[in-house]
Amino acid sequence: MPVSRGQYGQSVVVQAGPNSKLGFECFGVNREFFYAKDHERMLSGPYETGKTITALNLLNLLLGKYPNARALMVRETYTSLINSAVVTFEQKVLPVPPGDPRSPIRKFGESKPEWYDYPNGSRLVLGGMDNPDKFLSAEFDYIYENQAEGITQDGHEKLAGRVTGRAGNVPHPYIFGDCNPADPQHWIVNRPSLRVFYSRHEDNPTLYDQQTGQITEQGRLTLATLDALTGVRYKRGRLGLWVAAEGQVYEEYDPAVHLLNQFEIPSDWRRFRSIDFGYTNPFVCGWWALDNDDRMYLYREVYVTGQLVEDLATTINLLSEGESIQYTVTDHDAEDRATLERHGIPSIPANKSVKDGLQTVSERLRVQNDGKPRMYFLRDSLQFVDERLREKHKPTCTVEEFPVYVWSQTPSGQRKEEVLKENDHGQDMTRYAAMSLADYDPDGGVH
């Protein structure tokens, strides 16, 4: 297995995970990040540069090297952490997945992982910023922020305050993370105490041969996928630029305002569903609740390609068990609506006026005099991730569409008064939902 010279003056072994033939080695900017000593540092870059695998291997190395070290792995929500970085950590970083009798690392948690204990007394705690009270009272030697662009500046500062090193277990305690580029006003690129490292595709040994500098076959496939991105996703995901979305339809949308943590929906709130049909393009079903002040909440979502409505109807019924759904508003496809009807899901046709729908959604997104908008989206509403969409770096849920839902432009760059028909399937579903509240009378049906 590879041996790399560590920053502390001795050899350190980076063990191979079960899905790796050669073990882990990092190169270029990723390597600079790996061996840096800055108290706050972040590895930024476009998609597929090896940011997360580099950070996870660093975390594992530190816990294995320093007895009794305490570390925290954290993301915007606990659910998103255990469904992403934790899976990579167990399958591609640890030599043997926890739970295997051969593994020296023990995993704890009744139904979901909560922490790992290393044989040298070190511990890795898992957490989400949707429930920070579980760990913010503790002190850590290391904190790793996964997909840190989703963490607020206030959240980062609270985390940084818990990296004290008072126990004296490690020589250089620090907080580090990885992130994808976001808006240029984001705190990550505007925080003086944070050193940002900008990784490149050329730093990823699966994409470029590190001896010859030549692109690999996997590199050609990966970059072809990234080259197919458009707009702001191309600039951020392919070029690694921190840029704002140009011509974004809903300029009112602000994740800091419109994204809420999951909570139990009160039983007296109205509930309804909205569906945009699709097969090659995503099929999107959203479950909405309406509170007593006319505020909408997307609390559950299915966003998937390549599945028949026949099968999805069963999924919708299973996910809706025990709930009183007043109505389901859908796209106009008669065959798909008939399929839903056969499965006990009657529907009403959506009002598809784009102009009126855009205005209605904009008004709901706008913060009102009481300091609140009239439309919210709950984190972790997505029931499962479409891996085909994720591999293509396309939106996998409605909130991921907002930055890339833009106005069409003329060849000269002038804005047209029509929306670009890309990455709009969750947006259509949202528009149908908002318009249905103006058209549907719960006591008398459609107006």
Image: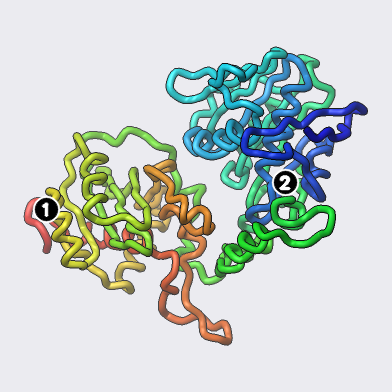
Above or below for 432 versus 79: below
- Identified at 28% across, 61% down, the residue is 277
Amino acid, disc 1? Arg
* Viewport quadrant of the N terminus: top right
Q: Position of residue 372 (x, y in %)?
A: 40, 48
Q: Which residue is mark 1?
A: 342
Q: Position of residue 381 (x, y in %)?
A: 38, 43
Q: Position of residue 39 (x, y in %)?
A: 79, 34
Q: Secondary structure at mark 1?
A: helix
Marks 1 and 2, how far apart at CA: 51 Å
- Identified at 70% across, 33% down, the residue is 16
The 10 Å Cα crowd at callout 2, few under 14, some 14 to 19, many 20 or more, is: many
Q: Position of residue 175 (x, y in %)?
A: 72, 33
- Circle count: 2
Q: Which residue is mark 2?
A: 43
Q: Secondary structure at mark 2?
A: strand
Seen from the viewer's position, the closer of residues 368 and 62 is 62
